[in-house]
Amino acid sequence: MRDLTRFSTFRGRQGSRSVSRPSDGSPNQLFSSGAVLVKEYDDGTLVQRSLNGDRAAFEELVVRYQRPVYNAALRLLRDPEEAKDVAQTTFLNVFEHLDDYDPSYKFYSWIYRIAVNESINTLGRRRPVEEISGEEIDHTPGPDRHAESEQTRGAIEGALMQITPELRSVVVLRHLMHLSYEDMAETLALPEKTVKSRLYSARQLLRSILVHEGAI
Amino acid sequence: MIDQELLALINAEIDGELSDRQRAELSRRLLADPASRSVRDEMHRVCQALDGVAPVEAPPQLHSDILAALPQMPVRTSKARWAMPKWRFAAALAGVLLTGTIVFRVMDSQEQAASEMAGTLAAPRAQVEVDVVQLGQGPVSGRVSLIRDGATLDLSLELVASSPVDVMVAGGGHSLRVNGVAGPTKVALPGFAGGSQPLNLSFLMAGHEVARATLSEPAGH
């Protein structure tokens, strides 16, 4: 039997899902358990069913998006507890404002936008003493940081925290969420040209930081 | 010299968006300038490192925490029904007329009992329990009932189990899945017509079916 929780996967670069779904609202991915057939619905259908009071449909949206939403928040905040809070707040906002969702946009663009905005708000609420500065990030290979990949990952995460949240957002959406420029523009409510310009700047800044620190 | 044009070409190369003309231009510039080659290689390494950051699993309790934080009431019906200004106007007008009528009647008929007025204005909506199944001894027990609420059917789940239960519901060509039932839960069954068509329920724990039940609405409801 297929486990629906495994469908909470990241998208391909062009915004396609790792598990394909029809866009016409028709169910797919039939699987059987005894005499019962369960159908998997696309996002739009689940949203509509949620609006009609079907709580199970909303729970399926949570299953689908909790992992990418949590990961986006984690990379923006670098704090697992705050990322968890952001994920919870994001889904609560989605639940309470589901009737504001415009189905002419992709549902995941909408939910990622809420998650990114909530993460940036969380960063804004941090007291200055809690902000992560360049000095606080340890990029020096220590005794318990032998693996090169682990070292690089730490350096990347540290460098990300040194650029502005606006630039970090485009990096997270592009390189960690693997969204297309079109989806990034929709998520951030920015022109595609602006998104590209921000991403180019962010990459260049990250290169400078990582070269300066000898991490690449 | 590293300029914005070169950086744009390098970024376009990373994104796989170079045209043939741009590719030729980038090659020419990289061949002519070792510093450009160095920047290009560093940019590629940065992006490869970013792409290589693996996603982490969400905390195991996140799903249940999110669901616990949600209001118990179902999501409101679509705002689209109220999006037309004329509907808003009609609704507002009806509200004003209704309020005016009530005020006038109360002031005009002081002798009329308040209970009569309430009975006139707000007849209770009938919810009828049309079928009930008691789950016996086993990994999951409790009470499952089918409720007719006007034109819609609801499923009421009062389950007792050591861990959250997933419930699959199928009948009359429709099906849905309710994940992580851990307490009294009421689920609307949009699209389920009821009537003579039975509703098949399958109860799952850790992906395995642990119980089944069938509910139906007797004729006459």
Image (tube, coloured by chain):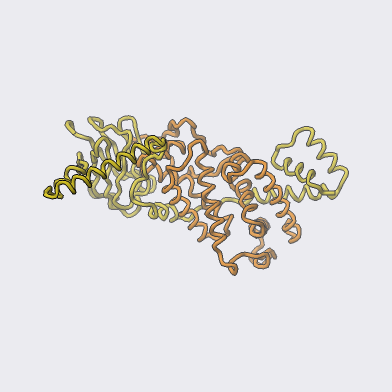
Image position of A85 with respect to A58: above or below:
below
Task: Name which quarter of the figure residue B22 lies in.
Answer: top right
Residue closest to the eye, B219 or B41? B219
Q: Quadrant of the N terminus of chain A?
A: top left
Residue closest to the eye, A98 or B155? A98
Answer whether residue B38 is visible to the viewer in this image: yes
Question: Would residue B191 be found to the left or right of residue A20 on screen?
Answer: left
**Residue at the limit of the structure toward the left, as seen here:** B111
Q: Position of residue A34 (x, y in %)?
A: 34, 36
Which tint was used for chain B? Answer: yellow
Q: Position of residue A68 (x, y in %)?
A: 53, 48
The chain whose colour is orange is A
Answer whether residue B138 is visible to the viewer in this image: no
What residue appears at the point 75 percent right and 57 percent down from the top-left corner?
A211
Q: Quadrant of the C terminus of chain A?
A: bottom right
Q: Position of residue B169 (x, y in %)?
A: 32, 38
Question: Would residue A162 be found to the left or right of residue A212 on screen?
Answer: left
Task: Name which quarter of the figure residue A33 lies in.
Answer: top left
What residue appears at the point 42 percent right and 33 percent down from the top-left corner?
A30
Q: Position of residue A195 (x, y in %)?
A: 65, 45
Image position of A150 with respect to B11: above or below:
below
What residue appears at the point 17 percent right and 42 percent down from the top-left corner?
B120
**Residue at the limit of the structure toward the front, as seen here:** B108
What residue appears at the point 71 percent right and 50 percent down from the top-left corner?
A201
Question: Would residue B19 be found to the left or right of residue B177 on screen?
Answer: right
